[in-house]
């Protein structure tokens, strides 16, 4: 299922006609518009896409695809106008049950809203406008009948003039229907002929050209006026900047750089989930409405010594969802970096008071190599020197960072990879049977591997103590180190690190033992779940993979579903008590003007509730079943796909968890953030297939991509991963060519690569990308039977036709199949040639 481009062409001016209600005259106004355009000597088309498709096919994607395919044919016929009329009112349901305001939003066709001229029509028209506007529709014109009794148009004209100058135009009401059909037709013909709304078309044409001009100039203007984050500006040119017109679901609609297609917009898969924040789909109506509700109810209200319902409801929801008996408090900030700074302030104060250190003592943190907790100075100091901070003037790394074993799928096996420098202490690399075995800590805690981890960590901490260093927190990202290169840390090592720290307070200082079992011990443990938390890896908390609880935890990113910035830092009561005093200066003096912004909190409530409801409804069961029954871990990226990628010669390793996929690529010049190995794949994805592409980010030699938590079908993921297969496709062609080089020498008159290898490999990959898993397996089963029976032509031919049946729903794939097996020569001749080829290949082997 390919994504559907938005309807924006230079030649075909496309507008969608919505009605404020049913029976307001949409068809009459559509006819008037079509007549006016035709009188100008321009091609004109009208389409009313209601009840498109059979009942079992009438989902949103199917309807939008049919509309796009139809309108694309009109584009090929030359310049003109197209008017798409909706059915009923703005929220009348489409065939799939989705209201039309939501259903047609991805098409981004400028809207002509037909207002209601009857009693109550002012309210209906304004409500329809707000519903459309809230969903990202551009309302270019409002038309309604000139009802002289209620004169709604007078009020609406003044009302919309104040909202950006949207024009409100009227025409007289049509004549009363006559009983005589012929007479009625004639009077309507006269009515349409007398209506002149050229000025409306001129306005629509002008605004359409302005939209295109602005869109085409945005990248150039941005390159001269925008300072981009995390980007070397010298490498930024207008050609490298994506002009995003809109976003919906998993896709941006970006300006199409190609001049070979009339489409000005092209879908681009949001492969980085907009810097890891998007999880419930762009332009999610539930989140949009939540934001509008809170903005209308509160705007922004100050938070010091005050409370509002969204902030309290979210705090209660997070404390319940975390299922951590230690947590009792929630602190609000605006982003992950700030939330991590807050967490460090909390931990260092608690440790300083317990161990009796002074406020000027040099206290550091324990962490992991490659970790990164944000771009503000305090958060930067929590990471070891690296490319992100080594040139920052005030940076001063304040910690000790452990090296550790990592996990990757390598050639189909899940491997615990031990760094070269730790093999004396931790042993060699080892294999685990599955991803579930990686997370089966109940079993792994009883292994010698765990005891080796414990001894190594204990030894390092003892040496640090002997050197006189002070530490005030253990801080780490559970499971995955994001910015450090999407590093999958062995969860057993992280668990061992927490266990050793908590049972070894003597290694950090001398202080009273906590009487409360829920109080922190050894050091306060901080889990930075800004990226990994709230279902990004498939669970509410990434900490649950470790089977242990943090004392402090930070959440952001998916907290608001990717709509608005917000961050929370949860803490235990023992941490909170470290700031309780009669002296105001002992308080946690941290905050900002928009703390606990009501809009962000309300959106977060809706976002978290939706993801929790999805879990309860079992909306990820299809992915869980694909990986393993009762799986400890799963991913929307199929197990088969991950296995295939892991065998690619260009791939060092791959992993997939929840909605995240990370591929480590070989680089002869070395790996790490400065590597350019993944840039080629990123460029390849940006170039796209011609109908869509992918917008992605890379981390050195690591290419990563994320799906949405709303992904409901493996088909969507297969579609999104389509271009990832292209490298495998190319490599497969190279490998196949190498395997058949001797045959090529024996048959110099045949171009094996062009005639056999490329068509066969392309067909194989297109089958994998388009068919369902069941269809593909059945197809491959019959192809295998055909190849096994080439000595029996009638039986082999029967299997060929049975294999072909599974390609019928996919015309493009079917054509490739027929070109290879059927069209070029009689089937039995083809089968005989295959039989002879197999004999020759066997002789060579």
Image (spheres, rainbow, N blue to C red):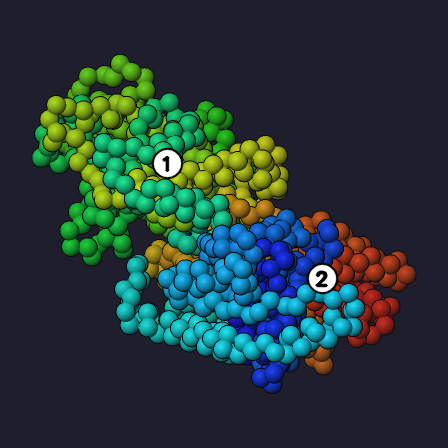
Q: Is residue 276 above or below residue 210?
A: above
From mark 1 to mark 2, how far is it between C-alphas?
48 Å
In front of the other: label 1 or label 2? 1
Q: Say which quarter of the image contains residue 260.
A: bottom right
- In what element is the residue under mark 2? loop
Looking at the image, can residue 275 be seen?
A: yes
Report the residue at 50% width, 43% height from top. Answer: 658
Give the structural element (helix, strand or loop) at label 1: helix
Query: Quick check: can you spot residue 651?
Result: no
Image coordinates of residue 361 in percent, x first then y, are 11, 34
The image shows residue 248, relative to residue 556, as above or below, that is below
722 relative position to 135: left or right = right
Q: Nearer the viewer, residue 722 or 221?
A: 221
Horizontal and vertical percent for residue 44? 63, 77
Circle 1 residue: 310
Residue at the limit of the structure toward the top, as seen here: 515
Residue found at the very far front of the displayed protein? 149
Towards the viewer: 542 or 116: 116
Judge the density around disc 1: few (<14), some (14-19), many (≥20) Cα neighbours within 10 Å: many
The quadrant in which the C terminus is found is bottom right
Residue at point 23%, 16% (across, down): 513
As drawn, the residue found furthest toward the right would be 794
The residue depicted at 64 percent of the width and 65 percent of the height is 27
Give the quadrant of the N terminus: bottom right
Q: Label 2: which residue? A: 810
């Amino acid at each position: 299922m390919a994504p559907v481009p938005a309807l924006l062409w230079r030649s075909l001016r496309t507008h969608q006609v919505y009605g404020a209600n049913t029976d307001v005259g949409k068809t009459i106004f559509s006819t008037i518009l079509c007549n006016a355009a035709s009188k100008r000597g321009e091609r004109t088309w009208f389409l009313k896409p209601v009840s498109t498709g059979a009942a079992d096919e009438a989902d949103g994607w199917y309807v939008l695809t049919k509309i796009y395919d139809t309108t694309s044919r009109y584009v090929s016929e030359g310049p003109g106008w197209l008017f798409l009329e909706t059915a009923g009112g703005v929220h009348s349901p489409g065939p799939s049950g989705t209201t039309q305001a939501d259903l047609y939003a991805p098409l981004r066709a400028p809207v002509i809203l037909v207002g209601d001229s009857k009693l109550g029509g002012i309210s209906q028209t304004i409500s329809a406008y707000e519903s459309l506007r809230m969903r990202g529709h551009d309302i270019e014109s409002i038309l309604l009948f000139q009802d002289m009794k209620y004169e709604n148009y007078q009020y609406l004209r003044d009302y919309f003039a104040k909202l950006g100058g949207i024009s409100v135009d009227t025409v007289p009401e049509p004549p009363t229907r006559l009983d005589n059909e012929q007479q009625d037709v004639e009077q309507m013909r006269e009515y349409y002929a007398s209506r002149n709304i050229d000025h409306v078309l001129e306005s629509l044409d002008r605004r359409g050209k302005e939209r295109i001009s602005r869109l085409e100039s945005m990248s150039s203007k941005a390159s001269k006026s925008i300072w981009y984050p995390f980007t070397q500006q010298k490498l930024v040119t207008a050609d490298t900047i994506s002009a995003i017109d809109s976003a919906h679901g998993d896709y941006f609609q970006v300006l199409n750089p190609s001049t070979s297609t009339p489409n000005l917009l092209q879908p681009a898969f949001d492969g980085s989930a907009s810097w890891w924040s998007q999880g419930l789909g762009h332009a999610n109506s539930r989140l949009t409405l939540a934001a509008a509700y809170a903005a209308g109810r509160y705007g922004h209200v100050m938070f010091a010594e005050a409370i509002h319902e969204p902030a309290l409801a979210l705090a209660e929801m997070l404390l319940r969802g975390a299922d951590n008996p230690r947590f009792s408090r929630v602190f609000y900030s605006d982003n992950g970096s700030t939330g991590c700074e807050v967490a460090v302030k909390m931990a260092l104060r608690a440790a300083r008071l317990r161990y009796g250190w002074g406020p000027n003592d040099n206290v550091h943190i324990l962490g992991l190599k490659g970790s990164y907790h944000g771009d503000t100075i305090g958060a930067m100091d929590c990471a070891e020197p690296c490319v992100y901070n080594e040139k920052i003037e005030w940076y001063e790394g304040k910690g000790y960072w452990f090296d550790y074993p990592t996990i990757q799928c390598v050639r189909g096996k899940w491997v615990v990879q031990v760094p070269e420098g730790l093999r004396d202490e931790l042993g060699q690399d080892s294999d685990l049977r599955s991803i579930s075995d990686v997370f089966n800590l109940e079993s792994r805690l009883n292994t010698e591997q765990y005891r080796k981890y414990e001894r190594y960590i204990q030894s390092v901490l003892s040496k640090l103590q002997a050197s006189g260093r002070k530490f005030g927190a253990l801080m780490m990202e559970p499971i995955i180190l994001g910015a450090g290169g999407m590093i999958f840390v062995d969860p057993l090592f992280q668990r061992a690190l927490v266990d050793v720290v908590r049972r070894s307070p003597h290694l950090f200082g001398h202080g009273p033992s906590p009487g409360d079992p829920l109080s922190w011990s050894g050091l306060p443990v901080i889990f930075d779940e800004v990226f990994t938390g709230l279902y990004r890896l498939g669970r509410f908390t990434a900490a649950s993979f470790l089977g242990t609880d943090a004392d402090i935890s930070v959440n952001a990113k998916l907290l608001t579903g990717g709509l608005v910035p917000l961050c929370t830092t949860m803490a235990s009561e023992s941490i909170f008590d470290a700031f309780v005093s009669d002296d105001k200066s002992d308080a946690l003096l941290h905050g900002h003007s928009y703390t606990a912004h009501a809009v962000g909190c309300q959106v977060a409530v809706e976002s978290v509730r939706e993801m929790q409801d999805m879990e309860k409804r079992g909306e990820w069961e299809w992915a869980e079943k694909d990986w393993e029954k009762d799986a400890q871990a799963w991913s929307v990226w199929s197990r088969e796909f991950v296995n295939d990628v892991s065998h690619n010669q260009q791939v060092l390793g791959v992993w997939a968890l929840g909605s995240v996929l990370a591929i480590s690529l070989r680089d002869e010049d070395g790996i790490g953030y400065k590597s350019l190995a993944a840039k080629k794949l990123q460029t390849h994805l940006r170039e796209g297939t011609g109908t869509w592409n992918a917008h992605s980010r890379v981390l050195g030699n690591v290419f990563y991509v994320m799906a949405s938590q709303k992904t409901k079908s493996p088909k969507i993921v297969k579609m999104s991963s389509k271009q990832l297969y292209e490298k495998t496709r190319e490599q497969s062609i190279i490998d196949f060519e190498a395997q058949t080089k001797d045959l090529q020498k024996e048959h110099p008159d045949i171009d094996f690569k062009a005639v056999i290898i490329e068509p066969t490999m392309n067909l194989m990959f297109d089958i994998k990308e388009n068919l369902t898993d069941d269809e593909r397996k059945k197809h491959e089963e019959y192809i295998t039977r055909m190849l096994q029976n080439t000595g029996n032509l009638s039986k082999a031919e029967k299997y060929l036709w049975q294999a072909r049946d599974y390609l019928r729903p996919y015309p493009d794939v079917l054509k490739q199949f027929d070109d290879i097996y059927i069209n070029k020569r009689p089937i039995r001749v083809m089968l005989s040639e295959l039989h002879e080829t197999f004999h020759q290949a066997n002789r060579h082997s």
